Image (cartoon, rainbow, N blue to C red):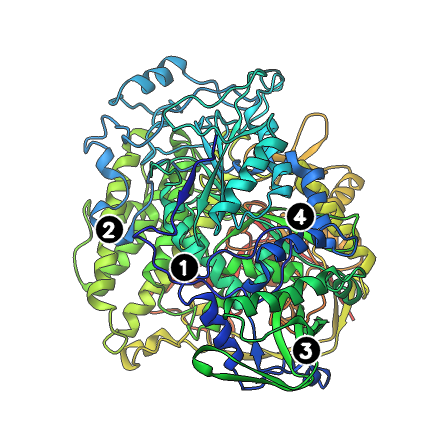
Amino acid sequence: MVADILNLRTSPKSSNASLPDPAAARNGDEAPAAGAGGDTLAEQIVEGLRKKELVVPGETSDDKEWAYAKDITTMVLYDDKGLDIYDRITQTDDYYLYGSELAILQKYGKEIAGRLFASTKLPGCCTTNIDNVPAMGCSSDVSSDNSSVSTPKSSPRLEETEQGEDDAPRKEDSYRGLQKKTDVKEKWGDSAVGRNNFGVNGNLGLDEQHKQSYGSVIELGAGSLKKTSVLLRALHDTLLVPDDTAAETKKPQTKLSGLTYYALDLEHGQLETTLAQLEKTTGEAVTTQGMNRSETSPVPASGSPKIVAKGICASYDDALPYLKEGKYDSSGSSSRNDPKSILFLGSSIGNYSRSGASDFLRKISEDAMLPGDTMLIGIDGCDDCATIERAYNDSLNVTRDFILNGIDHVDAILGHPGFSQDQFEYANRYNQPKGRHEAYLRAKEDFAVKVRGGEEIKFARGELVRIERSYKYTPHEAAALLASAGLRVVQKWTDDERTGGYSLYLVEKPLFWFPSTLEAKAKGVNPFGLPSLQEWDALWKAWDCVTLSMIPRDLLLTKPIDLRHICLFYLGHIPGFLDIHMSRYLKEPFTEPAHYPDMFERGIDPNMEDPSKVHAHSVVPTRMEDWPSVDEIVQYRDRVRKRLHSIYTERLVDPKTTDRRLARVMGMVYEHEVMHLETLLYMAAQITPGKLLTAPGFTVPDWPALSKQWDRQVAAEKRSARDDLVISYSASRITIGHDDDDALDAFTAYDAAHTFGWDNETPSRVVDVPAFKISQLPISNGEYLAFYRKAGMPKELLPGSWLQREDGSVGVRVLTAPGVVPIEIARDWPCMAAAKQLSQYAESVGGRLPREGELRRWHADHPVDHVGANIGFANWHPTPARLPAPIRDTGVAAHASNGGVWEWTCSTFDAHEGWKASELYPDYSRDFFDGCHWIMLGGSFATIPRVAGRTTFTNWYQAGYPYVFAGGRVAYDA
């Protein structure tokens, strides 16, 4: 039976818009990037040969020898003969890329297969859509009297699953009843209520997984499918074959009842051939006997379904809209709710320039992926000149034949004007400063050919014509590339036994994403001014994710930390604080209910040693029944958000008419919400293990696999460490803070380039920093554990991020299920603990925590917001710290990373010279000038880049406060 192939090349929807030109080299066994629309191939070739302006591919004197003007698109290399030659290239010993990727898939295939669909889905809306303000939130699904909840029609039925040891007993009658009814009387204390309403009560996690009927794997530029067949077998065995041990071990699974593989390529004939061959070689796992989604998946004699293989004949441009809508079948049927994973193997991303690669991946992310969808992408990280040059100029001269065959193809495409292989020789080099391999044709003699209309193209003896480029990516460069597309790295696999440095990255499109401030700066945009509506949308998605999807509804009325209000307070505090400042600026009444601001205006921060000492705060209900319901607060939240949106559309449209004070208000309330999101998160981390639910739209970590990866990373860094782990700084003078007096707002015009801040950041002042020494790495969990055990494991030294069991073993609390990971896995993470606890560790090794000036001096060399930094929810947990890496000429700096924590100093938080209270928020700092609070700097994995990336930002907590996501490094007097 012929495979089902959806042909989009003749689709009326075809835009013929081309993606960035893949003017580079072949990198795997796949065909060239499908996607060249627009001009015909002949027109592209002629345009490239017309070029006369000389291009020097670098800045060194050697680069001048490789200057060129003309270029030929890489697409000419892949005619039928070229594909045959290319297949021979992949079989040579010199071509490491193919062997490396194949080795990864063979070694880690089942592990990769198990991760492709491990993201927890978000079946319904729980966040505000700025583009459709009247439909803010999901309040329409909740009755106004809070007496019932309703289930959106699009939400699939939640299936019951086994309970873990730490899970609360489920009230089975109530839970089962929820599946059958659309209206359920709600009562506090029932953790099952609301689990099936993915709006206000959208609590999703590992304890309640969705049983998806089907999953879809789409491969871009499928080619021969030789390596893909290895992964498809693993997918079949991992996701489709029942696991008989699952019920016994209660191991969370991501099983599918059906899986469809779609090979996307430009050539219909090649798709038919390769899909037929795929079925022959993997018949036990794959079939082309396509089924509609409403039919039963093919089941062989073994009793498990097969993967159905289909084709999509299209360019990338034509296919992307269909991929996002889930319309893959020739019938045009939609499967939008199915999980989706995109394959982009063979290091095909190296075919694009660095900016082109970023644009391409961003297009895939925006046009083809939904939150929770994943992509497996091959990226070559080799940086050894000899290895690379040998791979692209093998000892058997197969690559030379491949490149020169392109000349014959050019001659055929242009109507045989007289091009021949005898006119050229193959030349290549690895341009290490640029991190790319370059392939050229060099003219052997002076000659000329006439192309269209008799136009003459001249070639001079020795002239170079660029035909291929293949970009290589260091780990930091790969991180920058993926982050630029808003893709979060879940895991990566590397072929450690070969010299290639090749990796497969699994990335996902998360529910929300906070780009680095470096991106905004590169575009000439100030990231510390007026936040955009898009920034608000991302923040609201994050806030709603935590409050309405991760913290079970009944636990919103609990106090994970005695020193704070119940979690529900923060759900009302955020819109309440926002509404207060909007009303003050506009001189208008509060949003109804008008008494909410009194209840939710300000939280508490009592003195840890004497809780009776506490600054002014809101008076909150003492009885649980007197608190507003979640539904009522969410409806209030939506009204406040709608009010903010109207301010943007009515008052903040034109920078020329924008009032500086209003812009400051927006920046202040935005950062206030940012900081309290982190407050609620470190409170949530203290919730009883097993109760906190997994963030929807994010993949749950595979701790054992990540632990092995981290062990390899740490071991490699220790082997290659060039300097001592403690480095010295000579005496210096630094500037702290900036000038941002809000008293000047009334007399100063709004300037989009102005950086807003808090009162403790201004004015700027010069500080002398004496000579000192400082550790390049923060105190790790492993180091602190040794100290803790040596001290006799006293309770006062137990970090708030740890959980100590009765048998003395220790686990680290994290925000992703299962909630606590063994200390062995988190051994190299920075230890999150109170300043006083970390101070005692520092003293035990003859040091201390750094002073404010010293830590700012360190951050000047190692910015917190950088490529690969663990901030802005790149992870929901710390990661091992990293030393700085060598930097090459690609514009990507490889700074040190502390693993994703704030860092304590030993400096007390107090008024500095020139400080004065803010007019807008006078109590922000001054209430904490009590000698109990110590300064901390930087940012954590839960701090967005706007805050972590502003070097003047100053945070503070009581020195004995053990819960915040903060660590520390050891400093020494010089």
- Marks 4 and 2, how far apart at CA: 43 Å
Return the x and y of residue 296 as percentages of the image width and height: 42, 21
SS label for mark 4:
loop
Q: Amino acid at mark 4?
A: Cys
Is residue 529 or residue 15 the one in the foreground? 15
* On-image quarter of the C terminus: bottom right
Q: CA distance from mark 1 to mark 3?
A: 58 Å
* Amino acid marked by disc 1: Glu
- Identify the secondary structure beneath mark 2: helix
Please say if the residues under marks 4 and 2 sit with CB atoms less than 8 Å apart: no
Q: Amino acid at mark 2?
A: Asn
Q: Which residue is mark 3?
A: 442
In the rendered structure, which amino acid carries the disc numbered 3? Answer: Arg
Which percent across, then down, holds residue 87?
67, 51
Q: How many neighbours does mark 1 have within 10 angstroms: few (below 14), some (14-19), or many (20 or more)?
A: some
Mark before the other along the chain sequence, 4 or 3: 3
Q: Secondary structure at mark 3?
A: strand
Q: Nearer the viewer, mark 3 or mark 2?
A: 3
- N-terminal label among 2 and 1: 2
Cα gap from disc 4 to disc 3, whole angstroms: 58 Å
Q: Is residue 828 visible?
A: no
The disc at residue 132 is 2
Which residue was labeled with disc 4? 831
Residue pointed to by mark 1: 671
Quick check: 829 above or below 923?
above
